[in-house]
Image: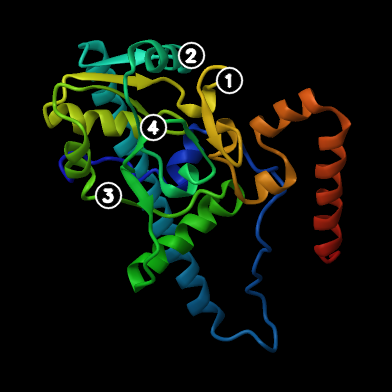
């Protein structure tokens, strides 16, 4: 795992490749360091802020380097034919006509909302529910760097991923590997390929790119909506919801407009 330097796929990594963006004027309130009766050691506070910003920048640079390195490996893996590409529609045909199994590698936060009927679930990254000092620090960083907007939780690599897949599928199995956006599934394909799996198929664009007729979905939401969350979902400012609004008409527009009004009234005027 360490030698592959897989990206963490938390909010920062996802936001780099996700077109959903917060409005430019959306931010947390600025903290003033000017003199105030309640201000304690402003110089020390400023130093702490600078160190936190430096730490976040270092983390961001590492994520960018890891993602760039991973992309090169994944491009080579596909170019050499070790993993074959399928569109969601083609994956649906392969499941129906050839009875190929679909391996769902998404975290539980997405799987619980929607899944492909008959698919096998083995997450490569899972929601980190621990509350030790290190995990809490990562949760705070994840939230500040985009989790509040996208709803992407803090994830940790599933160290049992390969062994769990090997319990369910032999090395000569023809596996269709899918995630929500098509990134984690590439990482999963890389691990499986290195472990000796030779018949791997990657769903390009992930389940988010699937139309309703492409795959037989189950769950409380459409497959497209399983990866959205946070404030962007609440306000209806995701690409998936905008597409749905265009189809459904004024009902959705009124709902999300009302939510925006509520948020505006909850924020005190300056």
Secondary structure at badge 4 equals loop
Mark 2 vs 1, N-terminal side = 2
Query: Is 30 displayed left or right of 90 in the figure?
Result: right
Q: Residue furthest bottom?
A: 37
State the separation of the CA atoms marked 1 and 4.
17 Å
The span from disc 2 to disc 1 (Cα, nearest Å) is 8 Å
Residue drawn 32% across the image and 19% down it:
100
- Secondary structure category for the residue under label 3: loop
Residue 94 quadrant: top left
Percent position of residue 152, x then y: 51, 48
Judged left or right of residue 199, residue 146 is right
Above or below, 81 against 116 in this view is above
Mark 1 crowdedness (10 Å alpha carbons): few <14, some 14-19, many ≥20 = some
Q: Nearer the viewer, residue 68 or 30?
A: 68
Inter-mark Cα distance, 2 to 4: 15 Å
Q: Are marks 2 and 1 in contact (CB under 8 Å)?
A: yes
Query: Residue 168 at what x, y percent from top left?
Result: 22, 36
Residue at the spot of label 2? 89
Marks 2, 4: nearer the viewer: 4
The mark nearer the N terminus, 1 or 3, is 3
In the rendered structure, find residue 119 and report the number of the disc placed on it: 4
Tell me which label, 2 or 4, sits earlier in the chain.
2
Q: Nearer the viewer, residue 236 or 6?
A: 236
Residue at 46% in and 71% down: 47
| Residue 170, image x, y percentages | 15, 29
Q: Which residue is mark 1?
A: 211
């Amino acid at each position: 795992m360490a030698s592959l330097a897989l990206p963490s796929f938390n909010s920062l990594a996802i936001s780099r490749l996700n077109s959903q963006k917060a409005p430019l004027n959306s931010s947390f309130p600025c903290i003033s360091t000017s003199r105030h009766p309640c201000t304690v050691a402003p110089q020390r506070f400023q130093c702490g802020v600078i160190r936190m910003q430096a730490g976040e920048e270092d983390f961001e640079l590492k994520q960018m380097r890891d993602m760039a390195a991973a992309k090169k490996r994944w491009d080579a893996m596909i170019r050499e034919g070790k993993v074959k590409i399928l569109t969601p529609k083609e994956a649906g045909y392969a499941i129906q006509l050839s009875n190929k199994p679909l391996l769902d590698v998404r975290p539980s936060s997405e799987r619980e909302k929607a899944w492909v009927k008959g698919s096998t679930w083995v997450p490569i990254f899972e929601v980190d529910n621990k509350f030790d000092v290190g995990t809490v620090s990562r949760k705070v960083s994840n939230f500040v760097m985009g989790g509040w907007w996208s709803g992407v939780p803090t994830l940790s690599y599933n160290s049992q991923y390969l062994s769990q897949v090997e319990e369910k599928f032999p090395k000569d199995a023809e596996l269709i590997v899918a995630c929500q956006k098509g990134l984690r599934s590439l990482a999963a394909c890389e691990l499986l390929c290195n472990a000796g799996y030779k018949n791997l198929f990657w769903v390009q664009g992930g389940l988010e790119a699937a139309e309703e007729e492409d795959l037989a979905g189950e769950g409380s939401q459409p497959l497209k909506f399983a990866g959205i969350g946070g404030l962007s979902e609440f306000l209806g400012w995701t690409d998936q919801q905008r597409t749905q609004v265009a189809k459904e008409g004024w009902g959705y527009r009124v709902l999300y407009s009302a939510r925006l009004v509520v948020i505006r009234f909850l924020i005190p005027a300056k």
